[in-house]
Amino acid sequence: MSGLISWDDEFSEANQKIKDIHTSFDRLRQDQQQESDELLKLQEEVISLAKAIGVSEESIEKILDSNIEPYSRPNRLEWDDEFLCKYNSSILETDVREEVFRNPCTIPSLSNLDYTIVGIAGLVANILDFLVVKIPKDINYLGKFKQEGSNFTHWLKTLGIDEEGELSPFLKWCEDTCKVSYDQSINSNIKGFNPRSHRLLSLGHDPLFGLIFGTLDILNGTMTAFDSNGKLHIVKTFDMPLADKAFAPLIWLGHIVSDMCTKMGVPIPGWAFLQLIQFGSFGSDKKTIADISRWMYLNGYDLRHFVTMSLPVAVIELIVRAYHYLSSLDNPEQLQTSPYTSITIKELHQIKSKLKLRKMLLLAHAVAATGNAVKLFTYSGNPLAINLPQWIFLIKESVKMIQAVNRDTTPEKIIRNREKINNVWQEIKNIHLE
C-alpha cells in the first residue's frame, strides 16, 4: 500500500498548516486571558469603590449587569490538538494507516439476556436428551448395565403397523408394488450380510444416498452393498421391466417408505459408509468403528431414533431463533424499511444480526453437546447414547463461525472509518471560539 500511495508531501504541508493554526490559537487564547484578567481587575475596583461610599451588597449586584466570569478555554476535542504537531510525517502516516486498516470486531458481543437465552435453550435440550431421547430401546449393556430405552422412539416404531405387527394397507401396497433389485436379504458372498443387516449394508436402502445408488441398481438390475470388512460389492440380481425402470426414483421412494415401519427400519442417512472406517480398538473385544456402527443399527439406532434425537436440536433452533427474531423487531438498527439509509449500512446491520444469531446458536449447541457427553458418561460409554444430530449441528455452526471470522471485512472497515470521520468532524464543528 505504501508503495502505491505516498502521503509524505501531503502530510508535510498539512502538518505545517496545523502548526500555524495552533500558533494562532495560542496567541488568541493569550489575548483573551489578558482581557479577562483586566476586566476582573476593573470589576474588583468598582466593587471596592462602591463599598467605600456605603453602597449595599444588593445595590452593587443591581449596578453590575452581570458578573464577569474568568476566562475559560473553549471546548476542545477529546484527542490532543497538539498530536499532529508532535510527530513527523512518516510516523504519522504509519499511525494513520494502522488506524484505517485495523480490523473491526468480527463477531458482535452478546448481552446478559442473550447469554441467559442461550443457557435456557441448552438446558432444555439437555433435559430432553436425558428424559426423552435416552437410547433406542431397553438394553443390558455389557451384560451388567440395565438401561431404559426411549418411549418416544418406541411410539414411533408403532406407527404404520397394527397390533399384530403387520404393515398398514398402504404400506403393504407399497411393499408389494415397489419391488426392487437391491432388496436381497441373504447373500453368502457378502460377509455379514443377513436379514437383520441387509438394509444397513445395501446402499439402495439409504434414505438419502439411496436415491442415487437405488436408482442405479434398479436401472442395472444389481445390488450395491458393503460387507462387514468395508469392501464394496456390486451383485447382479435381476432385471426389472422397462416400464418400472422409467419410474425408478418413485419405485425407490415407495420401497423406502414401506421399509421405514418394519422391525429393523432403515438406517440413518450415510450410516452405511461407516463400514469404510475399518480401524479403532474399542472395548474388551477390540471393535472397530465399523463394527460399532453395525452394532448400533442392530440395536435400534435407525432413522426413527434419529427423529427422536432431533428433538433437542429443534428446541434449540426454535428458542434461539424466536428470541432473535422478536428482539430484532424493536432494534433501532434494523433499518431495512428506512428510505434514507444506504444499502451498505443496511447490509452491514443484517450481517451483524446474522452473526449474533450464529454465535448464539453455536453456544447453545455447545452447551447441549456438552450435556450429551455427560449423558454418554452416565450411560457407561454406551454409544447408543450419542446424540448424532446434536453433534452434527455443533460442527455445522462451528464451520459457519470460522467462515464468519475469516470473512472479508473491507466494507466494514470503510463504514467504520467513515463513521469515525463523521464523529470527529462533528466534534470540530462543535468548537466555539469567542
Image (cartoon, rainbow, N blue to C red):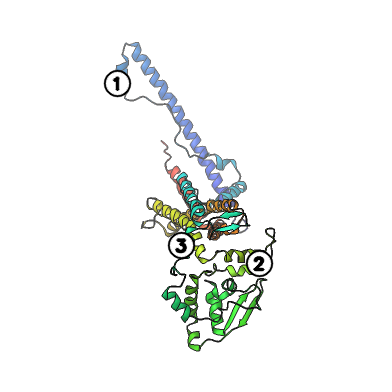
Q: Position of residue 34 (x, y in %)?
A: 46, 27
* Quarter of the figure with the N terminus: bottom right
Say which residue appears at 42% left-offset and 37% top-offset: 433
Work out whether mark 1 precedes mark 2 in sequence or the reverse, and give the earlier one: 1
Q: Which residue is mark 1?
A: 62
Residue 214: name its quadrant. Answer: bottom right
Numbered disc total: 3
Work out whether mark 3 precedes mark 1 in sequence or the reverse, and give the earlier one: 1
Q: Is residue 406 above or below residue 21?
A: below
Circle nearer the viewer, 3 or 1: 3
Of the pair 413 and 159, the residue shown nearer to us: 159
Q: Is residue 252 above or below residue 78?
A: below
Work out whether mark 3 precedes mark 2 in sequence or the reverse, and give the earlier one: 3
Q: Secondary structure at mark 2?
A: loop
Estimate how packed mark 3 is, as few (under 14), some (14 to 19) or many (20 or more) residues with alpha carbons within 10 Å.
Answer: few
Of the pair 218 and 36, the residue shown nearer to us: 218
Circle nearer the viewer, 1 or 2: 2
Query: What is the distance, in whole Å, between disc 3 and disc 1 at their CAs?
Result: 94 Å
Estimate how packed mark 2 is, as few (under 14), some (14 to 19) or many (20 or more) residues with alpha carbons within 10 Å.
Answer: some
Q: Which residue is mark 2?
A: 277
Circle on res. 335: none
Query: Looking at the picture, which amino acid does disc 3 mark?
Result: Trp
In the displayed structure image, the side of residue 396 where residue 288 appears, left or right: right
Circle nearer the viewer, 3 or 2: 3
Q: Which residue is mark 3?
A: 155
Of the pair 105 and 151, the residue shown nearer to us: 151
Query: Looking at the picture, which amino acid does disc 1 mark?
Result: Lys
Of the pair 203 and 407, the residue shown nearer to us: 203
